[in-house]
Image: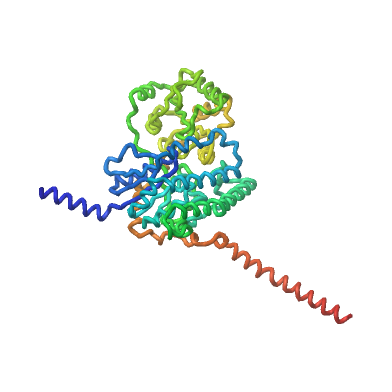
Amino acid sequence: MRALFTSAVIVNVLCLAQCYKILTVFPTAAPSHFILGEAIARGLAEAGHDVTMVSPFETKNPPKNGKVKDVVLTGLIEEHNRTVIHLFQMEQINMFTHILAMNFMGNRNMKKVLDHPNLQKLLKSGEKFDAVVMEQFLNDGLKPLAKHFNAHLILFSTIGPNMWVNGLVGNPDPSSYIPDWNIAYPIEMNLYQRTWNLIIKTIWYASLHLLSYPGHKKIAEEYLPKGIDFDTALYNVSLVLCNSHESTNQAVPVVPNMVQIGGFHIKPPKKLPQELQDFMDSAKEGVIYFSLGSNIVPSTMGEEKKMAILKAFGKLKQKVLWKWNEDTIPGKPDNVKLAKWFPQQDLLAHPNMRLFVTHGGLLSAFETIYHGIPVLALPIFADQSMNAARAQEAGFGLFMPFSEITEQKLDEALQKLLNDPKYAENAKRRSSYFHDRPIKPMDLTTYWIEYVIRHKGAEHLRVAGAKLPWYQYYSLDSIVVILLVITSPYFLLKFFLRLRKKSAKAKKE
């Protein structure tokens, strides 16, 4: 009994010293976003912290060494599925329409999240948290939650440093060599590309300040408790966790309170189900895995594209695993196996895996680099084109927009990737970059979240640029002063000469 009491005391003391109450907020009704949010919540819980997670999804597999309390935004998944547009048509949407649509979608989603009874119940619960870890994706109206819960605000960027987070922490984002996340430009852009990149980034920035922030401010003031200044809460960011890493993403500058943790969601491979294990083991020529991710419904692709893919796969001597949402496809070749779900990470770890045909999502990009598998990227929307461009530029994959797929093009790309050893070699090289880290990415995530809490928001990490208005940040006011100093003598001289000329003319008259 005494031993039990002593153990309980030790546990309580350790908890008081190390356990923090952390709220994770991942309100996007997309499985890929939830995968990332759940990985953070699980990692923090297993590190001994008391975690509450706000999400449209429920945590189905609780962590072994901790607990995550769910605040489920019920109904948002069904609402998302009813209103989501046909993703295969996204390539046809021009950039300006896309920006307006993103702003509209962000305002609509914010209203639904803040109006949800389960979130309102949490708001009125009187609970306090040490930190709020929040996904940064069209949800700036949620930032005052950190102030309401008396917590430090930590943002999670699903696509690495980008225009949605850079301005909040003063991170540099020069358009001269960092392409916008929506366009598949190379890192070394030509003049046309740099000019267009500058225009796109300027429009995004203007839309944030003229459309997005004002809209979210209005919604936040309607649904959140009064007395919280939205503009202060928006920039009160202690830390940004970026789902990026130089093994996969472009190398870019980051300020001290911005940390790259890309690949943190990846788990060590497990044994495959016996049927799949036998399939993989018996593939003497290797296996190709084809998946369009968790958000895209593959059966909604056009018949022409479907037949081109089937015919190209049918010519291969390799076996093919295709993640498909229906039981069969008319005309399916014998070497193609369909399933509605595959254990992707475990498949990529198998030594007979030769190639990953992917939509170019960032989670898939990290998983293929982790295991050193070359890719054929067929991007459809969002950051997929950028990820595809980086894979091709780094030499471990090829990039083909989904709209450009033909049987001949697909056949040529597959043969090139399967028969030229440089793609597999470059994939292995990139994999070595990924693994050569001083600390595992999830451990790094936990460390920095705890660091921010220990150091009361870690204000010493914040750069002064985060507090400057845009015209000061880019030194436009200083440039105006310099121009005035340089041009003033000329205009003054011109003025006095004009006066002298008028005076001389008056004397003559």
Q: Residue at x 38, y 29 (%)?
A: 350
Residue 152 horizontal side relative to residue 400, left or right: left
Question: Which residue is more in the foreground, 210 or 45?
Answer: 210
**Is residue 325 in view from this perspective?**
yes
Residue 369 image offset from top left, x and y in percent: 43, 38
Residue 200 image offset from top left, x and y in percent: 59, 48
**Is residue 421 in view from this perspective?**
no
Using the image, determine if residue 301 lies above or below residue 141: above
Question: Which residue is more in the foreground, 277 or 89?
Answer: 89
Using the image, determine if residue 89 lies above or below residue 222: above
Residue 218 image offset from top left, x and y in percent: 50, 54
Residue 455 horizontal side relative to residue 232, left or right: left
The outermost residue toward the bottom is 507
Question: Which residue is more in the foreground, 120 or 409?
Answer: 120
Residue 154 horizontal side relative to residue 86, left or right: left
Q: Residue at x 30, y 49 (%)?
A: 49
Q: Residue at x 78, y 75 (%)?
A: 497
Residue 509 horizontal side relative to residue 368, left or right: right
Quadrant in which the C terminus appears:
bottom right
Residue 151 image offset from top left, x and y in percent: 37, 56
